[in-house]
Amino acid sequence: MANAPVSSASLRLSGIENARRTVMQDHTPLPAGWIAPWIERSWQRCLSLGLAPHDPLTFNLVSDAQVRRTREANQRLVKTAQPILESLGRAIVNTRYFAILTNTEGVVVDVSGSIDRADPRADLITRIGTDLSERSIGTTAIGTALTELQPVWLHRGEHFFAGSSHYSCAGAPLFGPDGACVGMLDLTGIDAVERPELKHLVTQSAQKIENALVLSQAHKLMVRLNWPGNAMGSEADGIVCLDADGWITGANPIARQMVPNLAAPGQAAIHVSEVFGLPYQLLFDAARRPDAMLEIPLWTGLRLQALPIERAQENAPVQPHQRVVASDPMPLRDIETALIKKAVDQARGNVAEAARALGISRATVYRKLGQRAGPGA
């Protein structure tokens, strides 16, 4: 009688078990492709902490005082994430997965979805204040995403402790308006079918939370960014927010990938003129035009398409004509010239004063207007 075919799910679990034995018992590095490299790195970190895979697994709560401090410190994150978690819940309603939101230390600050409180495996990890850090409960999507700062997926035995092999989870770190990590978003299932596509869902949901965090900062102008030829108005846009004087109050991770000289976490705020090669007033003027789209140069020599939107208009949907690149956009030089003429008129012909207001040199004003500098100008 022929042997029954081995299912792909069984092969997957067998491969994970072989990897565990190689790393945790034989203490041998894994050949490439056995498991994701960041999982092996997490296992090695756990072993270096003195953890053993068959140790009892406990889900500890932080102290009451720490819970209070954690709640206070993460109010904005929780409030901002709630509507996105509700939408996320609709996507996973029939999957036996639920959502967990943590702070940067891996402590639970909010949960969402269908949670079976009668099952201690679900109840214990969804209590506000539970420490789900790598140091506390070993390799999970939570601890690993916060350490590796990238989206991850783990299934069953890819978790470090044998006692956590019931879980499957996807996780993505969350970055705040200044570019620093502020926490992470996790999707966890218990004895659930492996669904690696949840890594994409949790990554997309994390992007929505990050964008909402940027827009929750005080600002006067939001600028959506994308490369020429791409549709504008989706979660794939870079977002930069400015105050009334052109100082950057926040940017999402996509904008930081597009514009490499945005301020790094912990650095002083920078002016938008340091990242875009045009006077910042152009962005405010463009936002008041019916067709606000324009192309802007970066100091790197690249160009982006930009859609500036004043704060009062941010909740309005991006119009269809704004979702595509105009076939014949207004040339940037014409916009610049118009702004410079306007500044000179407002300064009653005083070029030096107009140049100071625009943050450019007098020579640039003359060059843009096609004039020569007069004596003593």
Image (cartoon, grey):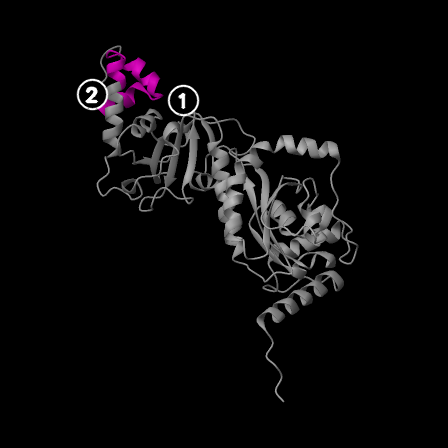
Circle 2: residue type: Gln
22 in relation to 67, above or below: below
Q: Is residue 41 left or right of residue 227?
A: right
> Which residues lie in the magenta part?
343-369
| Amino acid type at mark 1 | Ala
Residue 302 screen position, x and y as percent: 35, 40
Left or right: 131 with respect to 150? right
Residue 234: quadrant of the picture: top left
Q: Which label is found at residue 244?
A: 1
Q: Is residue 313 above or below residue 149?
A: above
List x then y, in percent, for residue 294.
29, 35
Location of mark 2 (residue): 371
| Quadrant location of the N terminus in the rendered image | bottom right
Residue 179: horizontal and vertical position, in percent? 53, 36
- Whether the residues at callouts 1 and 2 have beta carbons within 8 Å, the answer is no
Give me the residue at 49% from left, 32% from top.
263
Position of residue 261 measured from the top left corner of the image (x, y, whole percent): 46, 35
- State which quadrant residue 277 falls in: top left
Residue at 27% of width from left, 12% of height from top? 347
- Residue 332: image quadrant is top left
